[in-house]
């Protein structure tokens, strides 16, 4: 599913593969990106770059959730939950 972009639409939560003309694969990692951006905004009050890790290990998890390359992100919400559980 490729998103058609409306003029003025906020793309903060849209994964790069959803707006790419390159036909990049999409999957659960696409939703992980949106969830990561929601978490990033909750911690920082904005979604504007640069995404700077100011929240230690939690920030590192969020940083991985919003990587541009979907193959490098957590692949499922379950993987995110495992990472969060490991924080203790």
Image (tube, rainbow, N blue to C red):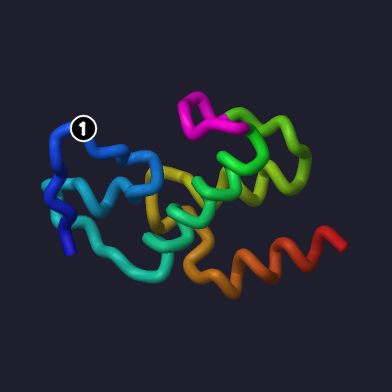
x, y (%) of residue 50?
A: 51, 25
Disc 1 element = loop
Residue 50 in the image: above or below residue 14: above
**Residue range highlighted in magenta:** 45-51
| Residue displayed at 53% across by 49% down | 38
Q: Is residue 28 magenta?
A: no
Which quadrant of the figure contains the C terminus?
bottom right
Question: Image quarter for residue 87?
Answer: bottom right
Q: Say which of 23 and 37 sits in front.
A: 37
Principal SS element in the magenta part?
loop
Give the number of callouts. 1
Q: Say above or below: 78 vs 29.
A: below
Q: Residue at x 66, y 33 (%)?
A: 53
Q: Assess disc 1: are there few (<14), some (14-19) or many (≥20) residues with their C-alpha within 10 Å of its C-alpha.
A: few
Looking at the image, which residue is at 70% across and 63% down? Answer: 83
Which residue is tagged 1? 8
Would residue 18 be found to the left or right of residue 33 on screen?
Answer: left
Residue 49 image position (x, y, % from top left)? 47, 26
User: Quick check: 58 left or right of 76?
Assistant: right
Residue at (46%, 27%) from the top-left corner?
48
Q: Which of 69/41 is in front?
A: 41
Query: Residue lying farthest right?
Result: 88
Q: Position of residue 81 (x, y in %)?
A: 66, 69
Q: In the rendered image, which quarter contains the N terminus?
A: bottom left
In percent of width and height, residue 80 lies at 62, 64
């Amino acid at each position: 599913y490729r998103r058609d972009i409306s003029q003025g639409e906020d793309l903060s939560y849209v994964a790069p593969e959803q707006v790419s003309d390159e036909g990049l694969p999409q999957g659960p990692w696409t939703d992980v990106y949106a969830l990561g951006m929601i978490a990033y905004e909750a911690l920082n009050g904005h979604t504007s770059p640069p995404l700077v890790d100011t929240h230690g290990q939690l920030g590192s998890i969020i940083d991985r959730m919003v990587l541009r390359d979907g193959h490098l992100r957590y692949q499922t919400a379950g993987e995110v939950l495992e990472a969060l559980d490991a924080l203790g």
